[in-house]
Image: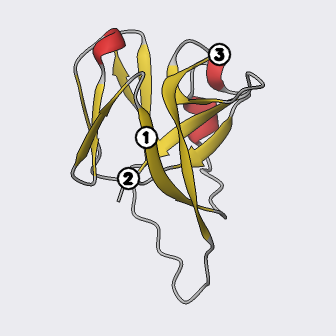
Amino acid sequence: MVNVGNVVVVVEGRDVSLGNDVSTGVGVSGRLDLVGGRCVGFIGRTGVGRVIVWPPGTKVSGSASDVRITSEGKTVRLGETIEGGTEFGHDFAGIRAMLPRACREANLLQVGLS
């Protein structure tokens, strides 16, 4: 978890191997916003937020509303619409408890930009 001013960017700190298990991936897109006013993620048309869990190796720079996230060779900022991929089956054990209280009720969504 990276705190940049009052903004939180969640970066998974370990590589996950599924071995020979099959995983299903889907495309995701949305505008980067602050879920609960604190955590970088997507907020849907219904107002429901999803906190993004970025892959290991993601770098965060800038501050507050000028947060820049560099992941898998691409740099994105708050307010930009991004497209990426996600895989189902991650439980992100332990991450939710570390989130700011304003973000804990949101779903967690792994997003890769490659």
Mark 1: amino acid: Ile
59 vs 112: above or below: above
Q: CA distance from mark 3 to mark 2?
A: 26 Å
Estimate the x, y position of residue 2 in percent, counting from the top left. Answer: 36, 29
Q: Amino acid at mark 3?
A: Ala
Reading the image, the residue beneath label 3 is 102
- The residue tagged 2 is 113
For image coordinates 50% across by 30% down, the residue present is: 31
In the picture shown, does residue 17 fall above or below 89?
below
- Which residue is drawn at the image coordinates 49% and 43% (left, top)? 53
Q: CA distance from mark 2 to mark 1?
A: 8 Å
Mark closer to the observer (3, 2) = 2
The residue that appears at 66% across and 64% down in the rendered structure is 89
Furthest residue to the bottom? 20
Name the quadrant containing residue 69. Answer: top left
CB-based contact (under 8 Å), mark 2 and mark 1: yes
Q: In the rendered image, which quarter contains the N terminus?
A: top left
Q: Quadrant of residue 75?
A: top left
Quarter that holds the C terminus: bottom left
